[in-house]
Image (cartoon, grey):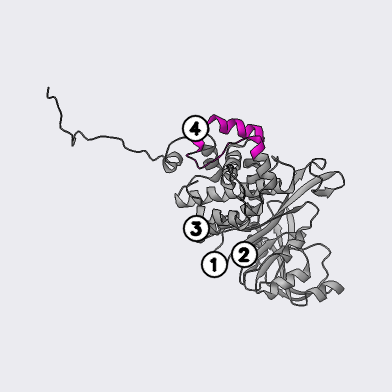
Amino acid sequence: MEYLPMHEFRQCVNRYKGDRYIKSFSCYSQFLALAFAQITFRESLRDIETCLGTFEKKLYHCGMRGKVSRNNLAHANETRNWHIYEDFAHVLINTARELYRHEPFALELEETIYALDATIIDLCLALFPWATFRRKKGAVKLHTLMDLRGNIPTFIQITQGNTHEVNILDDLVFEAGSFYIMDRAYIDFKRLYHLNQQHAFFVIRAKSNLQFQRIYSHPADKSTGLRCDQTIILTGIKQSKDYPDKLRRIKYYDSEHQILLTFLTNNFILSALTVTQLYKCRWQIELFFKWIKQHLRIKAFYGTSVNAVKTQIWIAICVYVLIAIVKKRLRLTISLYTILQILSVTLFEKIPIYQLLTDFEVNTTYSNHRNQLSLFNF
């Protein structure tokens, strides 16, 4: 927790008056308790209270003030504004992006590559009636824009499960010259044309019912899996109005999975094979969703209100990004999963974290020379 920027955390708390009228259990204590729950995978508020109660004498030195009880945690999750932890997560994200800015990428491209996708977190509709998704099923949807250079999420939005993915394009600020890799769920040519006008590039899978007219065919090396590289215009009545400019259509046969893929992009400079490899890198965001669902506590919740659910998810994201920051600053080669597993069983050990996560050993040899004179000579 020494890697947390405490000045920025206090600014986030003061921005939403999180500690106003609070005498004992502060927002920072709440953050520490829920971060402990994420790292050690606690199952309930009773579980958190019992485990932290075991280390009661050490909690003060960890920065936790006030008694950790189910009542305090439940009240904090219900009343403390979840935007505090959202803002703090973005502070950590900006720090992590700066650290991973020069991280090597699978393709030799200088531009920033983003992957956009969403994942569903299932909820019980009887306990979470606000999380509308299906008629008899509740869920929230985690929309994520990830910087593939370091796999750091840069934009996260939590919505009800019935919110369509394409609506998130309205909330994004596109960076000129950057690439945005998306699946078919984000096909909306009006929104894609807005992205094109911001001088950003997109790579997206095309639907089978696309209406278009071929203008020019570029040569394609079919031995690499490419089937065609075309310049097209859309001919559908609505599509042609929404996207009046030219597009590039690339077909690629994936021999490993035996599937024919069709991509659309507004970039005419990169080679067709590089465009297909860019889309393949989109799989990193799927691995991110799988990682946080398996190793963090975001599938079962400690509260049923909107505020409690979003607070827990944002603190989980803070923990993920904080581990990535520690890994980079300590120049560790082990995976985030390994770091999380080691921390889960050594949180209250008085061992330097670098020594804990590496094979580094501290020499404790003492010299025979003493400043204090010996009283007795034998």
Task: Classify 313 as above or below 207.
Answer: above
Q: Which amino acid does label 2 sit on?
A: Thr
- Residues under numbered marks 2 and 4 in contact, where contact means CB atoms less than 8 Å apart: no
Taking the spot 63% from the left edge, 32% from the top edge, the residue there is 47
Q: In which quarter of the image is residue 308?
A: top right
What type of secondary structure mainly makes up the magenta span?
Answer: helix
Q: Where is residue 85 in the image (x, y as percent from the top left)?
A: 62, 52
Query: What label does residue 181 carry, if any?
Result: none
Label 2's element? helix
Q: Is mark 1 on a helix, strand or loop?
A: loop
Residue 203 visible somewhere in the drawing: yes
Q: Reply yes or no: does residue 37 show up in magenta.
A: no
Label 4 vs 3, first from the N-terminus: 4
- Disc 3 secondary structure class: helix
- Residue at numbered disc 1: 110
Front label number (2 vs 4): 4
User: Which of the two labelled residues, at mark 3 and mark 1, occupies the earlier sequence position?
Assistant: 3
Q: Residue 184, can we see it?
A: no
Q: Tell me the distance, in whole angstroms, between the alpha carbons under discs 1 and 4.
A: 51 Å
Image height check: is 184 above or below 61? below
Whole-percent x, y for residue 188 in the image: 78, 66
Extent of the magenta region: 45-72
Residue that sits furthest to the top in the current view: 378
Among numbered discs 1 and 4, the one appearing first in the sequence: 4
* Figure label count: 4
Can you identify the residue that label 4 sits on? 57
Which residue does the numbered mark 3 point to in the structure image? 99
